[in-house]
Structure formats: structure tokens, C-alpha cells
Amino acid sequence: MSFLSRVSRDGIAADITRPEAAKLLAGDPVHSTWNIDEAEGLYCGLWQSTPGKWKVSYAEWEYVYIHHGHSVLTDAAGTATHLRAGDSFIIRPGFEGTWEVLETTLKDYVIRS
């Protein structure tokens, strides 16, 4: 076992999903997830979505780094945060709102459940 892993999609098959119909608000977003590692409630990898909008509700903690694209994360109070290449942020448990992908977005994620 190596103690160092490169964050890359190379050699990993993507898990392809879409938002649940009850959460979908616009478009037909396709999510591709390359889960690189998971251990003891920690998950990390890459996630990409095509344009669309859906409801989100976080029970977990997530760190995100945006590689490319443009998305808007809007909280339940209506405050919109634009996410673009080079941005990094933390989403804390309890966040509710919407995720809208305006331009196909690729992000690194680290999730602690």
C-alpha cells in the first residue's frame, strides 16, 4: 500500500448518476464521480457535472476545490455563492439550498461523514 496517491481520474471508471427526480429543478445534469479513496468515514476524489440545477441538503462536511467551470451554490436564505476555477470552500453539515451548474464543473472533494 502506498501512503501517497495522486488525485487523478486516470485508470478509474466514473460512477455516472443524475439528481433524484424530486430534487431536480432544471436541465438534465449528469454527474461523473471518480472516488479515489475512502476510509473511516472519509471520502475523496473528483466530481464533474454538466449544466442543471437541483436541491441539496448536506448532512456531512465537504471540502471542495474547483478545477474548471462555473456553478452557483445558493443557501436557503437565497444567498448565492459563485464557484469558479481556483476557488476552494467548505460546506458544513446543515447546509440546504440549491446547486446550479452554469458551465460543466470539475471539482476535487474531501467528504467527512
Image (cartoon, rainbow, N blue to C red):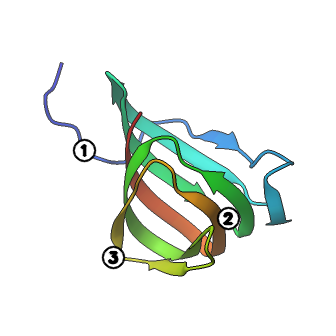
Going by the picture, which residue comes out furthest to the front? 77
Image x and y of residue 51, in percent: 71, 70
Q: Residues within 10 Å of mark 1 (few under 14, many from 20)?
A: few
Label 2 residue SS: loop
Residue 9 visible to an observer of this rendering: no
Residue type at numbered disc 3:
Gly
Residue in the image at 32% along x and 23% along y: 39
Closer to the camera in the image, 78 or 107: 78
Kindly give the residue lying farthest to the top in the view shown: 1
As rendered, which of 58 and 20 lies closer to the eye? Answer: 58
> Helix or strand or loop: what does disc 1 sit on?
loop
Identified at 74% across, 49% down, the residue is 19
Mark with earlier residue (2, 1): 1
Q: CA distance from mark 3 to mark 1?
A: 18 Å
- Residue type, label 1: Arg
User: Mark 3 or mark 1, which is nearer to you?
Assistant: 3
Residue farthest toward the right in the current orientation of the protein: 21
Closest to the camera, between mark 2 and mark 1, is: 2
State the quadrant of the C terminus. top left
Mark 3: few/some/many CA within 10 Å (<14, 14-19, 20+): few
Circles 3 and 1, Cβ within 8 Å, touching? The answer is no
Q: Which residue is mark 3?
A: 86
Residue at image mark 2: 50
- Can residue 37 be seen in this snapshot? yes
Q: Circle 1 is placed at which residue position?
A: 6
Residue at image location 35% in from the left, 74% down from the top: 87
Question: Which of the 4 quarters of the picture holds residue 5?
Answer: top left
Q: Residues within 10 Å of mark 2 (few under 14, many from 20)?
A: many
Residue 79 placement, left or right of 100: left
